[in-house]
Amino acid sequence: MNINCEQLDEDVYKINLEGRMDILGNQEIELKFTAMTCSPRKLFIVDLSLVDFMASIGIRTLLVNTKAINGRKGKCVILNPSETVEKILIMAGIDTLIPIFNSLELAVAAVHQAEHN
Amino acid sequence: MQTSQKFELEIVNNLNELRRMSEWLHQTLKNFNIANSFISNFDLCANETVANIISYAYKDDFRHQIYLCIEVKENQTVTLSIQDDGTPFNPFEMQEPTPFDTIENASIGGLGIHFMRNLMDESNYCCANGKNNIKFIANVNPALA
């Protein structure tokens, strides 16, 4: 599994994930994900468009890191999951905790708005 | 008389086997032109089940075999059976996870079993001759995809 981070503006970072987020894929990106989302960075968009499989272990990684981000008054949203992955996220109830967007512009606006609330 | 075809795979209790299992599952079901959404559901249920078995079912460090069987019936019903010789454990007796309220209180526990229960038309467990047997059954009619 691959992971990289790009800075979209002064405050917003986009984490791009690619591959199967199963137990093996998760092992490959877990520490990097945590390092990329650590302080002082606060606003994140997690792009799942190239993730073709999501197991509960992958959801755990999203949840644990979003908890840490929220704990320092940051915000994390999910961008463009495939239909299959989105179905699993919704079945897990994750969409109620980490909003899902299908537009980068709306995702950027959402994390900026959260920063000002 | 209704005909069916069976396909079997044997893996060992090593997490690296999960990818081989998923590839076998995808290849087998793709040969029947089964919709990707159904294949993904079987893939997820198999991954959650076998990851649990490998991680928690064995009290020793020995090599154990885990047997998988896919049965495709003419009426477009697919059954995935998973058998292991670990500690008896019925995942379907576990409580459903509490729905999330806030992210601070959110707990990930039980999510895999939640998927195993809800992605299939039928999921069941039995223990016989010292073996755990889990079955996942789904109607894969394209009209339902």
Image: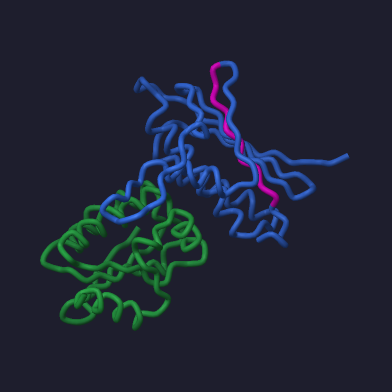
Q: Was residue B112 drawn as part of the magenta stretch in this picture? A: no
- Choose top left, top right, bottom left or bottom right for residue B144: bottom right
Above or below, B11 relative to B140: above
Above or below, B116 relative to A103: above
- Given residues B120 and A36, the one toward you in this image is B120
Q: Quadrant of the N terminus of chain B?
A: top right
Spot the residue most to the left: A40
Chain B as rendered: colour = blue
Q: How many marks do you count on the picture? A: 0
Which residue is at 38% across, 30% downward?
Answer: B56
Above or below, B110 relative to B134: below
Residue A47 drawn at (x, y percent): 35, 69
Indicate left or right for B65 with A64 as reference: right
- Choose top left, top right, bottom left or bottom right for residue B70: top right
Residue A79 drawn at (x, y percent): 37, 71
Above or below, B95 relative to A61: above
Residue B57 drawn at (x, y percent): 42, 27
Q: Which chain is green?
A: A
Q: Which residues are magenta?
A: B130-139
Spot the residue most to the right: B1
Indicate left or right for A82 with A112 as reference: right
Which residue is at 69% across, 40% downward?
Answer: B71
Which residue is at 41% across, 41% downward?
Answer: B110
Q: Quadrant of the C terminus of chain B?
A: bottom right
Spot the residue most to the top: B129
Colouring rule applied to residues: by chain
Which residue is at 33% across, 77% downward?
Answer: A107
Residue B2 drawn at (x, y percent): 84, 41
Which secondary structure is most common in the magenta stretch? strand
- Choose top left, top right, bottom left or bottom right for residue A13: bottom left
